[in-house]
Amino acid sequence: MTKKKIDRVVAIDLGNGLTNIRTVYPDGSPYELTLPSAFAKTESIGISFDGAGEKYNVSQFVVDGGNYVWGEDVYKIKGLIHTASSHEERYEMSNYRTFIEIVLGKIAKDVDIQPTEQILISTGVPSNQTKPSTVEAIKNAFFGTSKEYKGLHRITVDGQVYTINVAEVIVTSQPLATVLAHYLNEKGKVINKSLASKRIAIIDIGGGTTDLDTLVRFNRQENFRSIPVGFRQVYRAIRDEIRRQNDGKEVDVNDYELLNIIQNAEAKANEEGTEPVYTYKISDKKAPIDFTDTYLRALKELGMIINMHISEQWAEDFDNFDYVYLVGGSAKRLAPFIEILKNPDFPRDPGKSNAEGYYNFGVAKMNELNAA
């Protein structure tokens, strides 16, 4: 049987907090997308009478008879269905598998994937989840459960059916992906051959975990460490402060709403040349709640924990490493509080480095398969 040619690579970094996607449009121009790793039932939006309700910037999906929404404004919707989990069973959960269908449908619509195309999915996992059974579970999730043939997905997006044929799925470790983003270019060609001989430390700060890894000549060392703390610790502290200033009453505000507030405050301060002030407004009847001090204190406390684990992980001088990469969506926010790293190396975009590495590696693999 003749193996079909791979037409396009889709890189998906489906993190516990955010999902990063990298692929290309039909003309070869880059497509990038970052959205929450959470979706909602369509009914959660509520009912708009005569078009009076707020219009959310989301797409509607039908997956296995269920109706869901996902898109730029999904964080505004209450009752989100999360995919986050530190357990390897995550990849077999219906939350995760349904979300994969939603993600694939969104990509197919946005970049006009045709039913005749053969798609290579390039993705990855933390170092503590690289055992063969876990990798196989991830591959199975992306190949789907079609009874017609392996890899076939048909997803209804905004009333139209889109077809994706997943021909190959490759899974690599996240620390290696960070380095591959600098070793290969978007054509899958080597651009920094010297990296293959370097000794590299990688600190990857996620939403729920922080991973400490060492690569020596591209070989991941077995002394990796995954600690169960991440930026969610900061969000929890902010929520506690909002509740405290709200007379102890709970306020329904999710991580993504808080991230949006933080990003907007940073952008405003940068534009005005001032220090950012972080506030949350419960309603027009209540004064905004200033959580600036709490936020900075939470960053400091998370930095202290990471400092301690880094010190235990690598007792040697960091000058013994050729590179010390600090990655993750909030890596630069936390960098001033991780004082043990005096001068860390940052990827071009610390939050998207894994997806970039997955994509570059996926294109290299596509070139190899198509040349065979």
Image (cartoon, rainbow, N blue to C red):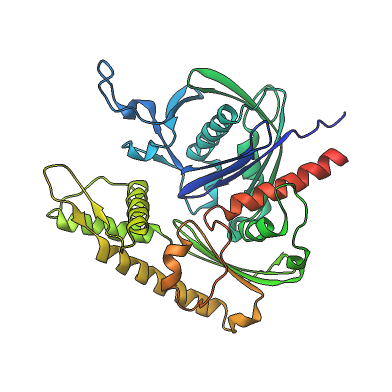
Q: Nearer the viewer, residue 137 or 34?
A: 34
Residue 133 visible, this orientation: no
Residue farthest to the front, as pictured: 272
| Residue 289 horizontal/vertical position (percent) | 19, 55
| Residue 344 horizontal/vertical position (percent) | 54, 72
Q: Quadrant of the N terminus?
A: top right
| Residue 337 horizontal/vertical position (percent) | 41, 72
Can you say whether 355 is above or below 105 in the image? below
Q: Nearer the viewer, residue 249 or 218?
A: 218
Q: Quadrant of the C terminus?
A: top right
Q: In the picture provided, is 240 more to the left or to the right than 125? A: left
Q: Quadrant of residue 195?
A: bottom right
Q: In the picture provided, is 122 more to the left or to the right than 333? A: right
Identify which residue is drawn at 82% across, 45% down. 368
Identify which residue is drawn at 65% across, 81% down. 320
Can you say whether 145 is above or below 33 in the image? above
| Residue 202 horizontal/vertical position (percent) | 59, 67
Identify which residue is drawn at 59% across, 22% down. 162
Residue 140 visible, this orientation: yes
Identify which residue is drawn at 80% across, 43% down. 367
Q: How many numbered dots are placed on residues in this image?
A: 0
Can you say whether 366 is above or below 230 in the image? above
Q: Quadrant of residue 314?
A: bottom right
Q: In the picture provided, is 87 more to the left or to the right than 221? A: left
